[in-house]
Amino acid sequence: MLSALQVVTTVLVGLLVGVEFCVAFIVNRILGALPDESLVLGRAHGGRMLGALMPFWYIGSVVLAGAWAAAGWHRAGTGPVLTAAALLVLSVLMSVLLLVPINNRSKTWTPANRPADWREQQARWDRYHYARVAVLVAAFALLVTALV
């Protein structure tokens, strides 16, 4: 049972890292090369689409990592799992406190209603997102380490 939990948790967190890495380093760069109108619409659509999915994915990752830590509490190698779970909690806090407020505004933007500082807000979101990706990569690395 523990082995299945370990695999499911590691795969789920690995996929989360992959999606968030792709958003940071591929999707946003593709959108950034488009005309401003398309950029705003693309990021707004992405914010709506991923904003609906990501809360479940993030919370699910925290729950699974916590379950793994609890199930393996008396076994060697629990430290990296606990640390990974703490980092996943940090990523949720970063999301709720830093990224979601910007995302909630930007997902309603159109070329006609975007605010004057829309580029600054998106640049701030990107900076926070890079930091969150780093936290997620560290959590994933710890989970993989705990498997070996």
Image: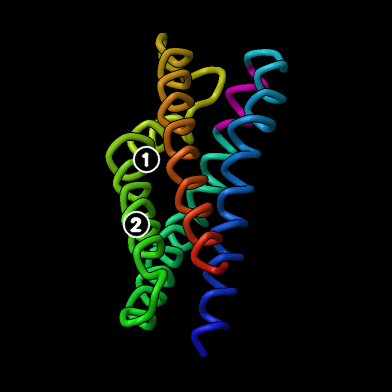
* Secondary element at tag 1: helix
Res. 100 mark: 1
Question: In the drawing, does residue 36 fall left or right of residue 128?
Answer: right
Residue located at (57% from left, 67% from top): 148
Res. 83 mark: 2
Would you say the magenta stretch is mainly helix, strand or loop?
helix
Q: CA distance from mark 1 to mark 2?
A: 24 Å
Say if the magenta span includes residue 42.
yes
Type of amino acid at the residue the image marks with label 1: Val
Whole-percent x, y for residue 89 in the image: 32, 55
Res. 15 mark: none
Whole-percent x, y for residue 52 in the image: 49, 54
To which quarter of the image does residue 33 belong?
A: top right
Q: Compared with residue 101, is residue 116 higher up or lower down, i.e. above or below?
A: above
Question: In the drawing, does residue 15 fall left or right of residue 121?
Answer: right
Q: Are marks 1 and 2 in contact (CB under 8 Å)?
A: no
N-terminal of the pair, mark 1 or mark 2, is: 2
Type of amino acid at the residue the image marks with label 2: Thr
To which quarter of the image does residue 105 belong?
A: top left
Whole-percent x, y for residue 101 in the image: 33, 36
* Secondary element at tag 2: helix
Say if the magenta span includes residue 117.
no
Rendering colour mode: rainbow
Comparing 106 with 131, the one in front is 131
Residue located at (53% from left, 75% from top): 6
Q: Nearer the viewer, mark 1 or mark 2?
A: 2
> Which region of the structure is painted magenta?
37-43
